[in-house]
Image: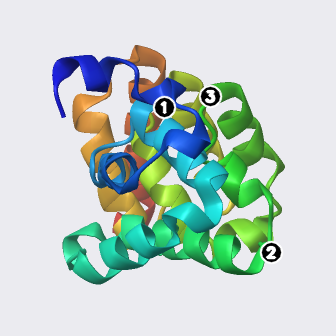
Amino acid sequence: MNKEDNSNWKFIEISKVDDKIINNIINNLKFDLSEDFYISIESVLKLGKKAEIALETQINEMDDYYIFKKELLKLILNYIKTNEIENPLLFDLYHPDFVIRANALREIEPNDALKYLHLIIPIIDDPDDSVRWAVINLLISLNQINNPIIYKKLKNRASFESNQIIKKKLLEILNLNLLNNSKI
């Protein structure tokens, strides 16, 4: 794909989308969370059946390093095949608009949040501060800070968090967790 193709990939008529474009869109889902990542998810959902074969291929070719993204692609593929999703808020968690992502994190019911924790935890690396803040507050409200996987993810996030308010909150909950565990 040359530079000219790349600059306008977001604005192509669905009827003109070919396999090469679909594969490029799906390949964006291998990368870190970014605006392009979220736009790619929306694009794949809009392409629907047209993206089905490429999604299946990508799922089969992804190794275990991409387990979260593989699960997300399976969720999208299942939706494309059945036109059903257990909780519509799941797609809002990956919407291109950060306000919708943050609101989805605030609105998701605790039982659903626990059920889909594997799709929520990676959002701690969202490019938007308000989304990261919403994830942290959701994990606290679900009492998940003691979960070793989540604790490690939050600790890692704290080491490179650029927003000082979020960093302070992370360090407080991580230190509080450390103190509580040492008293046991």
169 with respect to 117 (left or right):
left
> Which residue is disc 1 drawn over?
169
For the rendered model, the colour scheme is rainbow
Of circles 2 and 3, the one toward us is: 2
Residue 173 in view here: no
- Dot 1 crowding, Cα within 10 Å, few <14, some 14–19, many 20+: some
Q: Which mark is residue 98?
A: 3
**Amino acid type of the residue that numbered disc 1 sits on in the rendered structure:** Lys
**Amino acid type of the residue that numbered disc 2 sits on in the rendered structure:** Glu
Nearest the viewer among 168 and 25 is 25
- How far apart marks 2 and 3 lie (CA) works out to 24 Å
Residue 63: quarter of image:
bottom left
137 with respect to 89 (left or right):
left
Residue plotted at (30% across, 59% down): 152
- Mark 1 or mark 2: name the one nearer the start of the chain: 2
Q: Say above or below: 150 vs 14.
A: below
Nearest the viewer among 46 and 146 is 46
Question: x, y percentage for residue 34?
Answer: 39, 33
> Which residue is disc 2 drawn over?
84
Question: x, y percentage for residue 143?
Answer: 62, 63
